Amino acid sequence: MSFADLGLSDELLRAVEESGYTEPTPIQAQAIPPVLMMKDLIGIAQTGTGKTASFVLPMIDILAHGRTRARMPRSLILEPTRELAAQVAENFEKYGKYHKLNMALLIGGVNMSDQIAALEKGVDVLIATPGRLMDLFGRGKIMLNGCSLLVIDEADRMLDMGFIPDIEEICTKLPAQRQTLLFSATMPAPIKKLADKFLTNPKQIEVSRPASKNLAIEQRLVETSSRGKRETLRELLRADDMTTAIIFSNRKTMVRELAKSLEQSGFKAGQIHGDMEQSERLRELDRFKAGEINILVASDVAARGLDIKGVSHVFNFDVPWHADDYVHRIGRTGRGGATGKAFTLVTPEDAEAVEAIEKLTGGAIERVGKGAPVESSDEPAEAAPRRGARKPRGGSREEKPRAEAVEPAREPRPAREPRQDREPRPDREPRAEREARPAREPRPPREAPAPRDSQRDDRQPRRDADRDGRRRRDEFADDGPDDGWNGPLPSFLEVSLGTR
DNA sequence: AAAAAAC
């Protein structure tokens, strides 16, 4: 199966090839032909499966014919967060480089005037978050009656965020005669209802959830205490194989605090959460993508869909409230054929949430201890330890005065250098070229994330990367209890995992 | 419980 078998145009195939993809992912193979045939579609899938390209590619070919009219966009893509919307826009730029398509990115937090100017000129595709779209609609800047193709992406997330009434309203403003595509990771009742109401005779396709079965991500629960969390995190961050990490916390206040304290300790850390200015959010993402910082402390604004290459580790400083969020968070690593590690700090209070996560991901996640007391533990310390989960005795580290924790015992690793060794990133387009390219109106805000460098979710593993990934997994497959574990361990883990 | 999204 190749992209050429799916009925896409030659120009598009060229753009796809130049992006480095050779083979469609399962969802692309299943979705592209019916979308090209103008059928309605329900795609049960989440990012990481190649979902975005499964609608972006056929849309480009569909939109290649016909012409734009001022204020009357021909298609609309709805995204739950601004960052996701920007990411989809980058995809349109990347795959649409041989087509003359006009695009407008309508998201909040940025100046409206550029967006309005783009709308005046006429756009083929509108990529929007609901709030800004409704706002501009209310101002009479958009007419949606010429919009014959609608994509509702991340529908379940939209539901969580209370966007369903907005979506319904938007749907009523679109022509009844249209093509509608709906993507969702899960199909809760309200989403089913929405689909019944706004889609006609849809073809339904489903691909397995990537993260829960993703063998490329090594997951560990790190037992600690509420008070020991920060120190535990620092230990984990100093692991030799830690090159680039996203640290998730449940609270914005904690995101701020963690980022600040890590930075003060010499870590190259930044932050992203919803209380920040949009420009600031994008700037932090850019710094992270560019390697200026190698640690991004984030709220769940960054949990879903964000596609950043080369994230070696995900840390859950807090166990997420919902098991679903866990799957999304850890899915930020192990992307594009690479392997990744996901550590979740768990305290005795998290027992219930952890149980839900293990139920969802289908099995116990290996525990590694730091020696913190685990009161409600299901296994006494003396019992036969779970693989590699022996409780370290002594816990000399535990007795360290708190103040010392402020200074890392070792130099924090430099932000960039390790990843560069591994990833030459040949696909990073030189800035000069990027700027020389005719600007397509409007550019993402602040020439945001470089188009060619993001959105890995549709990327087939490059051959060498894949081979490497497989080799590494196999190498450790028969390695006994710690199968899959790779790379040097933080000192306290050596105690518990050690030689057996 | 938290976070996200328009001004």
Image (cartoon, coloured by chain):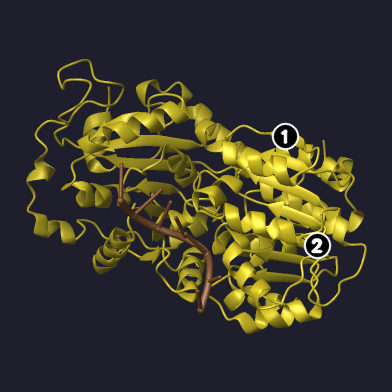
A52, A127: nearer the viewer: A127
Location of the C terminus of chain A by quadrant is: top left
Chain letter of the brown region? B
Residue lying farthest top? Answer: A384
Look at mark 2 in the image and give the residue it sits on.
A147
Relative to residue A387, is residue A92 drawn left or right?
A: right
Disc 2 residue type? Cys
Relative to residue A304, is residue A236 drawn left or right?
A: left
Residue A24 seen in render? no
Q: Chain of mark 1?
A: A
Q: Give residue A205's mark.
A: 1
Q: Quadrant of residue A114?
A: bottom right
Location of the N terminus of chain A by quadrant is: top right
Numbered disc in front, either 1 or 2: 2
Which type of secondary structure does the marked residue at label 2 adopt? loop
In the rendered structure, the colour chosen for chain A is yellow
